[in-house]
Image: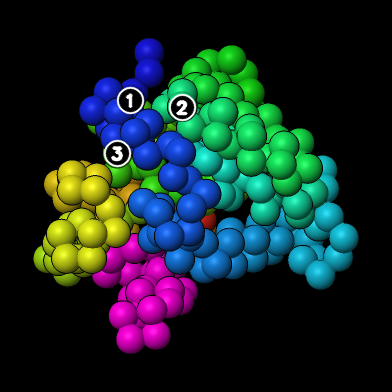
């Protein structure tokens, strides 16, 4: 059984061709990319004792990006030496990702599918990236249990999402969708947003040990994102370990 919402899939399939356009519909993700990469790479390096200054520091690590879209995170992970699998239930995203990887000279295993199907097939990974997905699934607890099943013992799960409070409604819904028109109206459902405490409980309930939570904060004056250890009011990212 898959836990995907057909309405959610349709929205992202319609945007598939825009993935690699930094000025297109995914401009917010391209702007967020440097801080996401900073967090992801530093957490993996710390957990597995890798030197990011070395050649292919993630060599020997098998990594899964769930909801990979056009491959924005898969490609840098592959460049760092990881064996990368990118999975997305929106079928039209995968040819876009495959084409761009081929143009970039990268070998990435892209598949149409879900976390649940991979778990049922017995796939296992050292690292699971789960970025801006959990707020779109109908049953976060069941979905995160599938993510846990995909991790090898000692594996690392990195999950980013949106906090649920008046500020996140103003910033992510009104700001991003209505005022800035960064995202199509209806991209997010504020009621599905998850607070950091709720996500920690969901991660524990799925059998993972939370390690860290960090905010990703947008500064409208500098027009840039930064990581914050204290401001988790809108966008945030967590790291958790499988026992």
Percent coordinates x, y for residue 225 in the rendering: 43, 74
| Residue 128 visible in the shown view | no
Which label sits on residue 136? 3
Please give the range of residues in magenta. Answer: 212-237
Looking at the rendered image, the disc whose residue lies closer to the viewer, 1 or 2, is: 2
Q: Is residue 227 above or below residue 138?
A: below
The span from disc 2 to disc 3 (Cα, nearest Å) is: 18 Å
The quarter of the picture where the C terminus appears is top right
Among numbered discs 2 and 3, the one appearing first in the sequence:
2
Q: Residues within 10 Å of mark 3 (few under 14, many from 20)?
A: many
| Residue at image point 64% right, 65% down | 42
Residue most extreme to the right: 55
Residue 114 as seen in the image, left or right of residue 107: left
Residue at the spot of label 2? 92
Q: Give the dominant element type of the magenta stretch: helix, strand or loop.
A: strand
Percent coordinates x, y for residue 187 in the rendering: 24, 45
Q: Secondary structure at mark 2?
A: loop
| Residue 142 visible in the shown view | yes
Residue 33 as seen in the image, left or right of residue 215: right
Percent coordinates x, y for residue 47 in the rendering: 67, 58
| Residue at image point 34% right, 63% down | 235
Is 229 contained in the magenta span? yes
Among numbered discs 1 and 2, the one appearing first in the sequence:
1
Q: Is residue 80 above or below residue 98?
A: below
Residue at the spot of label 1? 4
Q: Is residue 239 above or below residue 134?
A: below
The quarter of the picture where the N terminus appears is top left
Q: Secondary structure at mark 1?
A: loop
């Amino acid at each position: 059984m898959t836990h995907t919402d057909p309405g959610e899939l349709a929205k992202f399939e319609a945007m598939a061709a825009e993935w690699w356009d930094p000025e297109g519909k995914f401009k917010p993700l391209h702007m967020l990319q440097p801080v996401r990469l900073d967090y992801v790479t530093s957490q993996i390096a710390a957990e597995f004792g890798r030197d990011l200054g070395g050649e292919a520091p993630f060599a020997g690590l098998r990594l899964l990006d769930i909801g990979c879209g056009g491959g924005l995170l898969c490609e840098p992970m592959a460049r760092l030496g990881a064996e990368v699998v990118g999975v997305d239930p929106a079928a039209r995203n995968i040819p876009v990702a495959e084409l761009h990887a081929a143009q970039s000279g990268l070998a990435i295993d892209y598949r149409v599918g879900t976390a649940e199907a991979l778990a049922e097939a017995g796939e296992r990974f050292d690292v699971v990236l789960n970025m801006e997905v959990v707020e779109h699934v109908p049953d976060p607890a069941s979905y995160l249990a599938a993510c846990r099943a995909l991790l090898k013992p000692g594996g690392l799960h990195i999950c980013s999402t949106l906090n649920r409070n008046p500020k996140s409604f103003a910033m992510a819904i009104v700001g991003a969708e209505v005022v800035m028109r960064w995202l199509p109206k209806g991209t997010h459902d504020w009621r599905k947003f998850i607070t950091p405490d709720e996500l920690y409980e969901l991660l524990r309930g799925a059998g993972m040990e939370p390690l860290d939570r960090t905010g990703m904060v947008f500064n409208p004056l500098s027009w840039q994102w930064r990581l914050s250890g204290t401001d988790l009011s809108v966008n945030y990212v967590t790291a958790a370990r499988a026992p």
